[in-house]
Image: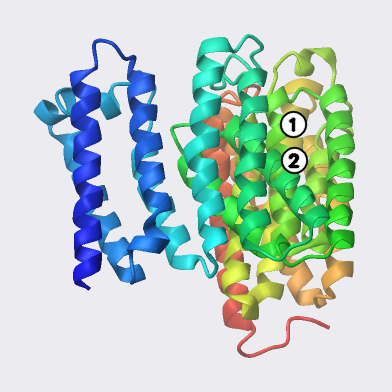
Amino acid sequence: MMTDLLAATGVLIVLGSVMIITKLCSKKLTPEISRKIIHITMGCVALSFPYIFMYKLSVVCLGVLAIAALLFLRKNKALREGLGSALLGVSRKSFGEIYFVISIVIVFVLHKSVFEYLIPISVLTFADSAAALIGTSYGRTNLAHEQEDAKSSEGSIIFFIVAFICTLVPLQLMTEIGRAEVLVISFLIGLLAAMIELVSRNGNDNLLLPLLTYSFLRYNSEQSLHVLFTNFGIMLFFSVAIFIVYKITNISKLSVVYSLLVAYVIMVQGGMLWIFPPLTLFLTFGILPMMKDEEKQLEQTYKVIECNSIVGVTCLWVAVFYPQYRDILYLAFSLSFACHLAINTYNRFVHFVKSGKPQAVFCALAKAIVFIALPTLAFTKMNGAVFLLYVVFVAASIPPAVSLNKRYDYSKAGNDTLRANKILVGSRTAFFTLILMITVQFYDIFR
C-alpha cells in the first residue's frame, strides 16, 4: 500500500509541475498547445499505472482526488486565471480534463490484460493530441456544418494513422493474436476512433474514445479473422446505405459519420436484431413523403442523430449490464425509435407537406407501426396485450409533439426542439419499461 501511496504522490507532483511549467511559458505557447502538453504528459504518466500501482482502489482514490482538485481549480477565480490558465485557457467550452481522469479510472478498473488498458489510453494520449495540433495548424478542409464544431479532414487522417499505430504495436508485442487479425483490428479501431473524434464536442472525446476503444477490444480481440471481416463487410453495407440517405436527404457530413458510429456500437453491443429499428428509422425518415428542396436546404447536424439514438443506445447499454432484462429492454429500445419516427413524420407533414393535423397524426402513427412496431412484433413474439401497449405508447408521443410544435419552431432542428424530443421519448420509454418490468413478475409477456 505504501508503494501505491508513493506512486500517487508522484503523479500529483508531475501534474502540478507540468501546470506550473506551462504557465511560466504561457507567453510563448498558445492555450491549445499548453493544454495538449499537459494532456500528453499526464497521458504518458497514466500509461505507467499498470506497472506502478498494485491496487485498483488506489487509482480510484487518486482519480477522485484529481477530479476534486480540478473542480476546485475551475471554481476558484484566482486559481483559474493563474495556475489553471494553462489548462482552462482555451476559448471553447470543454470539460476534457474531467473526462480524461474519469476515463482513465474506468478503463483501469475494467481492464483484465495490460494491452486492454494501454491501447485506449495511448489512443487518447497521442492520437487525440496529434489530430488537434495538426488540424489546428494545417487543417484546410472543414467537414463540419456551420452549427457544428469545426473538424478538418487532415486532422482526422492523422488521428486514424496514430490510432492505428497505437493499437498495432501493443497487440503485436503483447498478445498471441495472429498478424492478419492484428492488422484488421488496428484498422477498425483507427476508423472507429477517428469517427468518435469527428463527432465529439466539449471535450467528451476524452471519455468516449477510451471507453468505446476498450469495448471494441474486449469484443474483437478474441474473434476469428472470418468474424472480423464479416463485421467489416457489415460496416461497408452501413456506409453505402448511409451515403445513399445522405444524398437524398438533408443530413450533414458529420451526421453520416455519427450514424455510422451509432450503427457500429449497436451492432457490437446488441447484434443484428438490435440494428433493425435504428436502421429503419434512418432509411425511412426522409421518405413517404420524399423530401422537397425546401426541406433539404435545412441541413440537419449530427445532434439530430444523437437526439434520435441516445435513448435507444441507453436501453442497449442497460441490457448489456442486466442481460436478464434483455428482451424487455429490446422492446423499450424499439419503442424509442418508433416514437422518434412518429414525431419526425408528424413534424414533416405539418411544416413541409402543409397537411392538416388529422392527416399528419394518421400518417405518423401508420409509418411508425408499419415500419417498426409490426417487425418488432414478429421478431420478439410479444403477446397481443404488450403489442397494444406498445402502440398506445407510440400514440402517446403525438399529443405532446403537437403541443411542442406550438412552442418551438420544429421546422428547424434547434437545441430546444432536440432537447424536448429527448425528454419526450425518454420519459415514454422509461415508463413503458417500468410497466413491463412489473408485469413480467406476474405474466409471461411473450407468446
Q: Is residue 214 visible?
A: yes
What amino acid type is highlighted by mark number 1?
Val
Depicted 434 relative to depicted 26: above or below? below
Considering depth in this image, is 144 or 23 the residue closer to the camera?
23
Separation (CA) of disc 1 from disc 2: 6 Å
Q: Give the image quarter of residue 406.
A: top right
Extreme-front residue of the structure: 173
Residue extending farthest to the left is 78
Q: Label 2 amino acid?
A: Leu
- The residue lying at 69 percent from left, 30 percent from top is 255
- Residue ranking furthest to the bottom: 442
Quadrant occupied by the N terminus: bottom left
Residue at (33%, 65%) from the top-left corner? 53
Residue position for label 1: 256
Residue nearest the viewer, comparing 25 with 384:
25
The image position of residue 149, as x and y in percent, is 53, 22
Which secondary structure, mark 2?
helix
Q: Residue at x 47, y 59 (%)?
A: 107
Q: Which residue is mark 2?
A: 260
- Residue 437: horizontal and vertical position, in percent? 59, 78
Image location of residue 75, percent across then percent down: 17, 35
User: Marks 1 and 2: CB-CB under 8 Å?
Assistant: yes
257 versus 326 height, above or below: above
